[in-house]
Amino acid sequence: MQNAMRTRAIGNVQVSAIGLGAMPMSVAGHMPDEEQSIRTILAALDAGITLIDTADAYTPSHEEVGHNERLVAKALARWGGDTGSVLVATKGGHTRTPDGWDMDGSPSYLREACDRSLKALGVDSIGLYQHHRPDPKVPYEETIGALKELHDAGKIRMAGISNADPAQIRLAHDILGERLVSVQNEYSPRFRTSEPEIDVCEELGLAFLPWSPLGGIGRTGELRERNAAFTDIAQAHGVSPQQVCLAWELARSPVVIPIPGASRPETIVDSAGAAALELSAEELARLS
C-alpha cells in the first residue's frame, strides 16, 4: 500500500520529494537480477515514491538499449497501486557504442530515441522527457527545438534538460517556455558545483533533480569518511547518513527533488524516509 509522502512540483505535477534513480539496475557488473530490480521498484512505489528516473542509455551493453526503461515498465505493470500517480522521467541524447558512451543531440536522433522510448515504456506519451547531455557537435538551440517539436506533437507531456549550465538552462527556457519543467545535474556533498544551476532553477520555477545525490555508485559510504557531521547528525536522529544527506539537499531549495539510485528494496525505502527528516538550522550549518 502506498504511503503518504511530502511532495514537490515538476511543472504542474506533484511528485514525491524523493524520487528513484533506476540506473543502478542496468549497470554491467553492478546490476542485480531482474526479480530483485522489480522488487526494488515496487518497494519504492509502496514507500510513496511517485517519480522514477530512467533513460534509454541505461543498459548493460549497447545491444540492449532501453533495458532500464523496459524494467521500469515491467515493474509498473505488476504494481497494484495507481500507476497514473507515477511520473516516469526518461532521457534521450546519449548513445551506447561497443566502446562505451557517446552523444547525439541532432533533432533526427532525438525523434528516433523518443519513439524508441515510447515503445520501451509502453506509453502513448512520456510524462517527462529530458535531453541527456549537450552534444558539442550540435547547436544547443537545435537540440532544444527538437524537444519543443516532440512536446507539440504530443509525444511528451513535459520537457527537461540534463547536465546543463546556467546559460543553457536560460536558452532552453527561452525556447521551450512552460514546456521546460526540470533540470537534472549532478549534486551531492562531494560535488557541489551545481549551486549556480540550482539558483537559476529556483528563479525560473524549474525542478532541480540531483543525480548521484549520495555520491554515485559505490561511493555512498564516503559520507561517513568525508564528513563526520553527516554521521553525527544521523546518530542524533537515529537514521542513516544517507537520509541526512538527502534531507540536506531537500533543505537547499524547495525546487530540489533528489533521485537516489538503488538496486535493493532496503536502500530505496531508507532513502524515502529522508522526506520526513527535518534538520535544524544549526545542523544544516554544520553540513554546509
Image (spheres, rainbow, N blue to C red):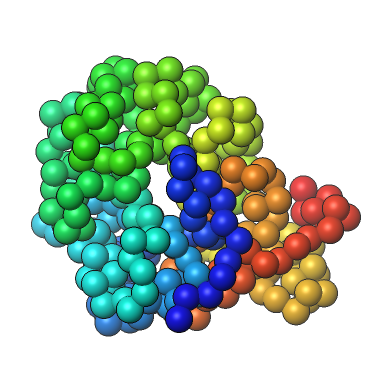
**Which residue: 78% across, 74% down?**
237
Q: Is residue 23 above or below residue 152?
A: below
Q: In the rendered picture of this protein, how many numbered marks are placed on residues?
A: 0
Image location of residue 196, percent across then percent down: 62, 30
Image-based side of 86 in relation to 288, left or right: left
Q: Is residue 13 above or below residue 230?
A: above
Residue 140 rendering spot, x and y as whole percentages: 33, 21
Q: Nearer the viewer, residue 226 or 255?
A: 255
For the N terminus, give its image quadrant.
bottom left
Q: Is residue 131 visible?
A: yes
**Toward the viewer: 187 or 281?**
281
Q: Residue at x 37, y 19 (%)?
A: 175
Image: 240 above or below 145: below
Q: Residue at (56%, 70%) from the top-left corner?
A: 4
Residue at 80 percent across and 70 percent down: it is 232
Q: Is 77 drawn above or below residue 137 in the view shown?
A: below
Compared across the picture, whether 260 is left or right of 115 comes to right
Q: Position of residue 168 (x, y in %)?
A: 44, 23
Quarter of image, res 29: bottom left
Residue 267 showing in the rendered view: no
The picture quadrant where one finds residue 272 is bottom right
Coordinates of residue 276 in the picture (x, y in percent) = 67, 67
